[in-house]
Image (cartoon, rainbow, N blue to C red):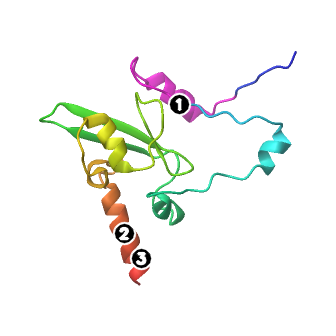
């Protein structure tokens, strides 16, 4: 019978240790041998976040958050290698920042201005930075 071995680096284990009981943790598995995995093509970003990722303003694994104090809502999402957002508590990823935000808030909302990086910048700030770089 084949054996399944799963190895996590220390950052994944640290994240799991800090996870709350109601937080969803997504794990992606790739089947194959080490040689197959090494030769496998990496995901190509597509959709609205692709430009930011190709310009290296946003990377896979980046955690985005928001907090709406008056509404008492918070959200957390992680950027996937193909440019989608995995929102805590939701079973499927979202291609659009606004659709990801809507899934949390229940309202149509501009996800570009709502989602923040750890340093406080919004996705819209990154989009403006990309536009400045392109204009040069």
Q: Residue at x 31, y 62 (%)?
A: 125
Q: Which SS class for mark 3?
A: helix
Q: Residues within 10 Å of mark 3 (few under 14, many from 20)?
A: few
Q: Residue at x 24, y 47 (%)?
A: 109
66 left or right of 5 in image:
left
Decide: is 3 above or below 47. above
Q: Residue at x 58, y 31 (%)?
A: 27
Q: Which mark is residue 133?
A: 3
Query: Looking at the image, is mark 1 or mark 2 earlier in the sequence?
Result: 1
Q: Is residue 16 visible?
A: yes
Q: Which SS class for mark 1?
A: loop
The image quadrant of residue 3 is top right
The image quadrant of residue 126 is bottom left
- Please tell me whether mark 1 or mark 2 is closer to you in this view: 1
Residue 73 part of the magenta segment: no
Q: Residue at x 48, y 35 (%)?
A: 92
Q: Residues within 10 Å of mark 2 (few under 14, many from 20)?
A: some
Query: Looking at the image, is mark 3 or mark 1 earlier in the sequence?
Result: 1
Give the percent coordinates (x, y) of residue 118.
35, 47
Q: Is residue 65 visible?
A: no
Q: Are marks 3 and 2 in contact (CB under 8 Å)?
A: yes
- The CA span between labels 1 and 2 is 30 Å
Q: Read off the residue under disc 1.
A: 26
Q: Read off the residue under disc 2.
A: 129
Looking at the rendering, the stretch of residues picked out in magenta corresponds to 7-26
């Amino acid at each position: 019978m084949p054996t399944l071995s799963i190895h996590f680096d220390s950052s994944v284990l640290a994240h799991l240790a800090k996870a709350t009981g109601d937080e969803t943790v997504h794990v992606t598995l790739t089947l194959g041998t080490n040689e197959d995995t090494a030769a496998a093509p990496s995901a190509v970003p597509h959709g609205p976040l692709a430009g930011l990722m190709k310009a290296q303003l946003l990377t896979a694994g980046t955690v985005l958050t928001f907090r709406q104090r008056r509404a008492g809502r918070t959200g957390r999402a992680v950027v996937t290698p193909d440019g989608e957002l995995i929102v805590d508590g939701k079973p499927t990823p979202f291609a659009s920042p606004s659709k990801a935000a809507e899934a949390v808030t229940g309202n149509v909302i501009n996800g570009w201005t709502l989602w923040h990086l750890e340093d406080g910048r919004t996705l819209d700030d990154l989009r403006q930075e990309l536009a400045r770089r392109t204009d040069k």
